[in-house]
Image: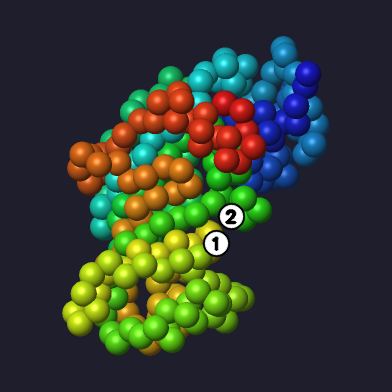
Amino acid sequence: MADRIQKTLAHAGLGSRREIEAAIRDGRVRVNDRQAELGATLGPGDRVAIDGRPVNWEKRVDVPCRVLAYKKHVDQVVTRHDPEGRATVFRKLPKLEGGRWLAVGRLDVNTSGLLLMTTDGELKRRLEHPSYELPRTYAVRVHGRVDQAMLDRLVEGVELEDGVAHFESIRMADDETRANRWFEVVVRQGRNRVVRRLWASQGVTVSRLIRTGFGPVPLPGGVKAGSYYELSRKEIKALAAVVDLKR
């Protein structure tokens, strides 16, 4: 059965669904020597070229999905090429015969911890999609006075510049008398810098932020910063299942 071209090429690891759709709209994708159209189907034997270069999409679709639990360190950036010459999270990933590694969401340069990487564009799209509301867990150290009323507000909801946001839960992780206190927070909204902005809305500063979980995947233990753990087939199936995907 033929699938829509953007879904098939994303599954083949040639980019995220959004990136493939943009390439089609820009006229950069051709099928059987004709310009591709959004929503068109792609079936066995169809010839595909992106930016004039033929791609063996059928071979790539048959490659098993791979997922890495990458342990990002502070000062790394989530981009393939950085004009400032900073280290990127893509620099030391396993080599692939086809396709490429795709980051699931982003972490800003000052945030460390778990970053999921996959070769499967459709899995990436679903893990990022707001309709699934996957929990992201963070360890956060804040500087400033924190009381119960503030924590209640952060759970109930705070108006930010791009709408109301809130933490699913907050757990105190150390002595409340400390000037710099650690908390564990869970958020289901994958919005830009939402954890930092929520705390800032209450007049306190985040001095350290570590993502410790994404959906069912925890930050791997025994893995040094800048390295990764590759999920097993069983773990990938469990991850895909939470976004209604069979892998």
Disc 1 residue type (three-letter): Gln
Q: Quadrant of residue 123?
A: top right
Tell me whether the residue at label 1 lies in contact with that at label 2, contact meaning CB atoms closer than 8 angstroms. yes
Tell me if mark 2 has few (under 14), some (14-19) or many (20+) residues whose alpha carbon lies within 10 angstroms of its own: some
Horizontal relation, residue 124 to residue 207: left or right: right
Point out which mark residue 80 bears.
Answer: none
Q: Where the N terminus falls, by quadrant?
A: top right
Relative to 145, is 104 above or below?
above
> Depth check: 140 or 97 in front?
140
Gap between marks 1 and 2 measured at Cα? 6 Å
> Depth check: 41 or 245 in front?
245
Q: Residue at coordinates 51% horizontally, 20% vertically from top-left? A: 64
> Depth check: 194 or 140 in front?
140
Q: Quadrant of residue 217?
A: top left
Which residue ends up furthest to the top in the rendered image? Answer: 45
* Residue denoted by label 1: 189
Q: Secondary structure at mark 1?
A: loop
Residue 179 location in percent, x, y?
Answer: 20, 82
Residue 205 location in percent, x, y?
Answer: 32, 79
Disc 2 residue type (three-letter): Glu
Horizontal relation, residue 61 to residue 21: left or right: left
Q: Secondary structure at mark 2?
A: loop
Residue 76 location in percent, x, y?
Answer: 29, 53
Q: Residue at coordinates 69% horizontally, 18% vertically from top-left? A: 47
* Residue denoted by label 2: 133
